[in-house]
Amino acid sequence: MNIKTDFGVSTDRPPANALRVEKWSDMPKGTAPARYEVVAEDGTTKTFTLAKGNRIILDALIQQPVYCASPVRISDRVCILRRDYGVPITKEMYSNDTATDRAKFGVYFLSGSVRRIDGGAA
């Protein structure tokens, strides 16, 4: 079964490189403050500093898509990144997750230009 995405496109499977997070150690390791830049669709840029959990989640999303459901509450951090920092994160929905037997599941993607500009190890 195909499910519509935030982009309006139907897909069957998430990307093979999507990160399934079972514990914080599955994520990037750096937690020290780091600066990021987001380029909006109109070309304006916004820079901000993140540390700890918010930084870990954004670093993971910069590297690859991330499954939504997780014991480390990724969705809470995604809401903060979207609302407080304007990070363009979308969610695509899929069906029939064979790894978890879920009928529906989501994967987060960065949908715009986001990069780390300094600070901390990759």
Image (tube, grey):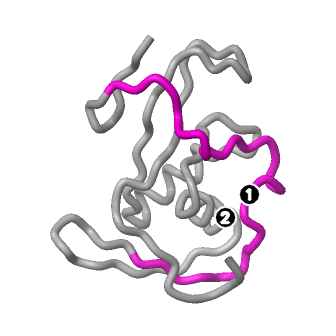
* Residue occupied by mark 1: 27
Position of 49 relative to 82 (above/below) = below
Which residue is at 46% across, 49% downward?
A: 109
The residue under label 2 is 56
- The quadrant the C terminus occupies is bottom right
Question: Is mark 1 in CB contact (under 8 Å) with mark 2?
Answer: yes
Residue 12 located within the stretch drawn in magenta: yes
Residue at the left extreme of this rendering:
42
The segment highlighted magenta reads 10-37
Q: Which residue is drawn at 58% across and 75% down?
A: 50
Mark 1 element type: loop
* Residue 46: quadrant of the picture: bottom left
Instruction: Give the image location of residue 72, x and y in percent.
Output: 74, 45
Residue at image location 82% in from the left, 47% down from the top: 23
Task: Tell me: 115 left or right of 44.
Answer: right
- Residue 53, percent across and down? 68, 62
Mark 1 residue type: Met
